[in-house]
Amino acid sequence: MTPPATIDPAPNRDTVPVFVIGSGRSGTRTIFKLLSGIDGLEIHHEFCCTHVQPAAALYAMGRLGVDEVLTQLRSLHSAAIALSDANTWIDCSNKLTWIVEPLLRLHPNAHFINLIRDGRKVANSYFHKLPDEMYDDRSTAILRAWLDDPEGTSKPPPEKKFWWNIPIDGMPFAEQFPQFDQFQRATYHWVESNRVAAKSLAEYVPSDQQLTLRLEDLVTERTTLEAFCSFVGVPCDDSFAEYLKTPQNVIYPMDFGLNDEQRSQFAEIAAPMMRQLGYDINVKEYTVGY
């Protein structure tokens, strides 16, 4: 493992940045709400999303160079960290999954938490709860048209729904992606997010500056919660465990379930990643109780 060369760390070197990455729909907002209001922490959820998401997507698709990403991040995360009075500055955002290396170049003391969740729950949550915000047919077609003809087509505005990665030639699933429906595109996002996160952490981030955990374990296992709190540097309050068992983004737990076609689609795209992350795809997806 060779950490990248460092570039212009934030002026406030006493503030430690922590970046919570993942696929989204995997607990990042829950972590944000759990840690909000704790003394010594400044925490955000999807900090400057309309600036970060297009840059991260373009970088992942090979359409934006690392120097351009670094320039943008200096005026966003680096500026906020430099101006923070907190001991720890946290951003919980799946958008950062694609730019781990640039973040570490700017902030060599940064810590990363990779938050994982059963892909069936992630894809289904995106598909049912955010159908107009993530990989809808029209927005995906607009981004594809601009990627194919950037000179003759208007660039999409920095609105979240337009900026979800499309695999370019040579990337995983590039050949299959044009035939994917919205649920398959959400499944692809889960697979690729986890692949890129694992690869980036392994290649660039020192082992003592990273923590990978599953949402299911964070919710049910005290040892996982304690490891998380220790990594962030906060006391493991008993109230945290109770808080994590309460649904945070809905009034009550919502289980839509996969239909037979979706189970087949998901298995075709995501079975290898499910096994890699320790999930049994042959066991029916768990019921949300938190």
Image: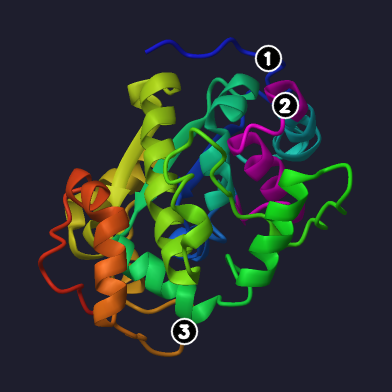
Q: Residue at x 45, y 36 (%)?
A: 112
Residue of label 2: 70
Residue 72: quadrant of the picture: top right
Query: Disc 1 vs disc 2: Cβ atoms closer than 8 Å?
Result: yes
Amino acid of disc 1? Ile
Q: In this orientation, does residue 152 appear?
A: yes
Amino acid of disc 2? Leu
Check disc 1 and report its element: helix, strand or loop.
loop
**Residue 28 rendering spot, x and y as whole percentages:** 47, 58
Check disc 3 and report its element: helix, strand or loop.
loop
Q: Mark 3 against mark 2, which lies toward the viewer?
A: 2
Amino acid of disc 3? Val
Compare marks 3 and 2 and give the one earlier in the sequence. Answer: 2
Magenta region: which residues? Answer: 43-68
Q: CA distance from mark 3 to mark 2?
A: 36 Å
- Give the crowd class for mark 1: few <14, some 14-19, many >=20 residues within 10 Å: some
Residue of label 3: 250
**Residue 272 rendering spot, x and y as whole percentages:** 22, 47
Relative horizontal placement of residue 283, taking residue 166 as reference (left or right): left
Relative horizontal placement of residue 265, taking residue 103 as reference (left or right): left
Rendered view: 136 above or below 142: below
Q: Nearer the viewer, residue 218 or 105?
A: 105
Q: CA distance from mark 1 to mark 2?
A: 9 Å
Name the quarter where the N terminus is drawn.
top left
Residue 134: quadrant of the picture: bottom right
| Residue 66 part of the magenta-drawn span | yes
Q: Nearer the viewer, residue 71 or 89?
A: 71
Q: Residue at x 40, y 20 (%)?
A: 203
Labelled disc at residue 7: 1
Check disc 2 and report its element: helix, strand or loop.
helix
Labelled disc at residue 37: none
| Residue 217 part of the magenta-drawn span | no
